[in-house]
Amino acid sequence: FAVQSTMCASTPQPTPAAATAATCREEQATQSAGTQAVSMAGGITAAGSAATGMSSTEIAVDRTSVERLGTGQKRTAAEAFAAPEEAGALLYAQFWYYIDAAGVTQGPFDSLKMRSWLEAGYMNGATTVSPSYYGEVPTQFWRLSELYQDPLAEGFLVASDALVATEAEVPPEEFIPAEKFAGARAGYVFKNDHYGVGYYLDEEPPKTVTYETLEEEKRIKRYKASKLSAHAMPKFDAISS
């Protein structure tokens, strides 16, 4: 903003030489004050420009570049996070498995159930999980923090166009963790077993069919048949004789 005036030297003045000199000094003082005012309004003083060796325009451009760089770094940090490709499209995962504190693989559980456990504090970024898209048992697991940049905000969310598994498709949970008895649950029994304290699925043990069981079943049938024959009515000819 260094403005030099040549008006006094080039413009003829009808006034005497002393008046002309005084007028030039007043104009130069006015221009100097205007330059200082512009410099203060821009936030750049003459001392600051001299210290940096940059013009006011260069300083303004440099400040803008720094602001853009900071915004770009934030954007780059967000874009740099990516879940492992082997995990697949997590927003379309129908079921999930997780590894409990005892190292036992649990699942499958639907995304809604996993989300509720996460929000309740049963899981965190260090919990080891794996998606299951068709109910298959996964072979590779990851920490939640490896799958989601913000596990609490993003964990186990399902895309709006995903085919969400219905209750009929979701197998009943084998174990529901609970610190204390909270009332009866249909189809479950509360106890402390190999998964810890909680509700366990109450189901009959599967029947194993072997040669011995088949023979035992035949023996029982023959015994019942003999009992019935002993109480049968005698034949007519035996009575008449």
Image (cartoon, rainbow, N blue to C red):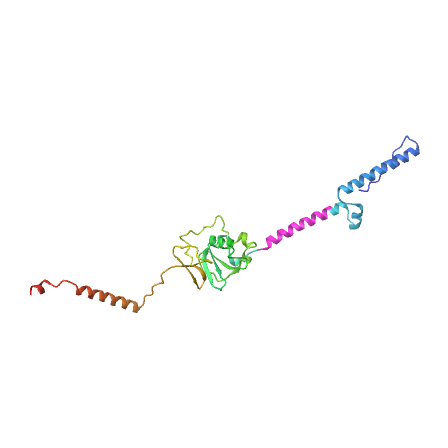
Residue situated furthest bottom in the rendering: 212
In-image side of 16 versus 91 (left or right): right
> Vertically, is 239 above or below 110?
below
- Residue 167 vs 191, above or below: the answer is above
Residue found farthest to the top: 14
Q: Is residue 120 magenta?
A: no
The quarter of the displayed image where residue 5 is located? top right
Instruction: Assign the N terminus to one quadrant of the image.
Output: top right
- Count numbered badges in the picture: 0
Question: At 27% across and 68% down in the image, what residue appears?
Answer: 216
* Residue sitting farthest toward the left: 241
Determine the residue positioned at 62% across, 53% down. Answer: 76
Vertical order, 153 against 195 (above or below): above
Residue 223, can we see it? yes
Viewer can see residue 89: no
Q: Position of residue 168 (x, y in %)?
A: 40, 52
- Which residue is drawn at the image coordinates 53% and 52% (left, top)? 154
Q: Judge from the rendering whether residue 58 lies leftward or rightward of residue 30; answer left or right.
A: left
Query: In the rendered structure, which segment of residues is drawn in magenta?
Result: 60-81
Q: Quadrant of residue 241?
A: bottom left
Is residue 73 in the magenta section?
A: yes
Residue 159 picture location, percent across and down: 50, 50
Left/right placement of residue 74 relative to residue 222 reads: right
Percent position of residue 109, x then y: 45, 56
Residue 158, percent from left and from top: 49, 51
What type of secondary structure mainly makes up the magenta span?
helix
Instruction: Tell me which residue sits at (82%, 39%) in the image.
Output: 33
Between 88 and 114, the one lying in front of the other is: 114
